[in-house]
Amino acid sequence: MTALIPLRRKTVVWFAAIVVAVNGFFPALWILFTSLKTETELMRYPITYVPDAPTLANYQQAFTEQPLLRFLWNSFVVASLSTLLCVLVSALAAYALTRLRIPKRNLIMSVLLAVAMFPLISLMVPLFKLMRELGLLNTYLALILPYAVLSMPVCTLVMASFFQDIPPDLEAAAMIDGCSRVGALFRVVVPLAAPGVFTAAILAFVNAWDEFLLALTMMSRVSMRTLSVGITLYQGEFAFPWPLISAALIVAIVPISILIALFQERVVGGLTAGGVKG
């Protein structure tokens, strides 16, 4: 009987892994196969899961019917700059929370966690009014600033969990050698906490790349729309060209997939290490 327990555990683990893999990969594969089909084949019955005659015409049309390259550039600029700003400010905040004698530190950490749970829809009206008063609508800053601020709580908590395990003596030695406190942070602490910094940066970048509601509200000009919003322009008044939309979706998925693949070990190591720190 006891010998069956490990077998049952392995069965449960494998079953859960298969469910997660199917749930994660099947939609992406379905979108990929749809992007390679024609409208006629898509409407055929019975359904063909794999395209009979794959075509790249949908990808060509996706780049010519709408300014898809412009949407890609807008998303890249907004996501990159907001991530840079978020990581910079979050590193300073995490360092202050873990090194300086700040009163009510635990309360501040709890407030950060609570702020991270705020629904975005509740912030839409004040953010829109603020950006309108500042004259930032239809500019990159209208998205860069909110994206950076919205990702800061999570990024701060992630980096703080790594900073607190780095011995303060290393920073003290660097400051004796002439470094300022900020210099010690970026020359000693940040390199040693690289997995946490990479994890925070990837989380901030993905959130900015995928965000839809703010991008739709702040950008009314087609030339300033990000990829997530620009894809909605492919739908017609009375029909949805699913193969064309699927091709645009694949174009949106590829950069994130490449990014995750390149930094997979650092992200997974950062999330795992951060999850076991206490």
Image: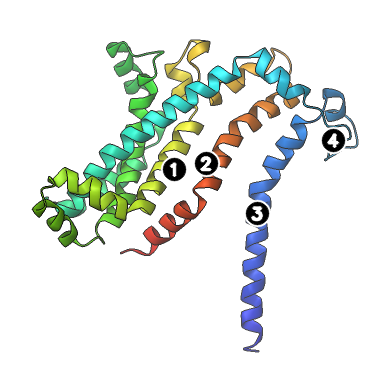
Q: CA distance from mark 2 to mark 4?
A: 28 Å
User: Percent position (x, y) of residue 68?
Assistant: 60, 19
Residue to which mark 3 is pinned:
21
| Amino acid type at mark 2 | Leu
Name the one closer to the observer, 134 or 91. 91
Circle 1: is it few (<14), some (14-19), or many (20+) Cα within 10 Å? many
Q: Secondary structure at mark 3?
A: helix
Q: CA distance from mark 4 to mark 3?
A: 22 Å
Does residue 108 appear in this view?
no
Q: CA distance from mark 2 to mark 3?
A: 19 Å
- Tag 1 near tag 2, CB within 8 Å: yes
Q: Nearer the viewer, mark 4 or mark 3?
A: 4
Q: Quadrant of the N terminus?
A: bottom right
Q: How is the image coloured?
A: rainbow
Q: Residue at x 62, y 68 (%)?
A: 13
Residue to which mark 4 is pinned:
51
Q: CA distance from mark 4 to mark 1?
A: 34 Å
Quick one: which residue is furthest to the front in this view? Answer: 177
| Amino acid type at mark 1 | Ile
Residue to which mark 2 is pinned:
259
- Tag 4 near tag 3, CB within 8 Å: no
User: Percent position (x, y) of residue 14?
Assistant: 66, 66
Name the one closer to the observer, 20 or 65. 65
Q: Secondary structure at mark 4?
A: loop
Is 2 situated above or below 194?
Answer: below
| Amino acid type at mark 3 | Ala
Q: Is residue 239 left or right of residue 141?
A: right
- Tag 1 near tag 3, CB within 8 Å: no
Q: Is residue 127 left or right of residue 93?
A: right
Earlier-in-chain disc, 2 versus 3: 3
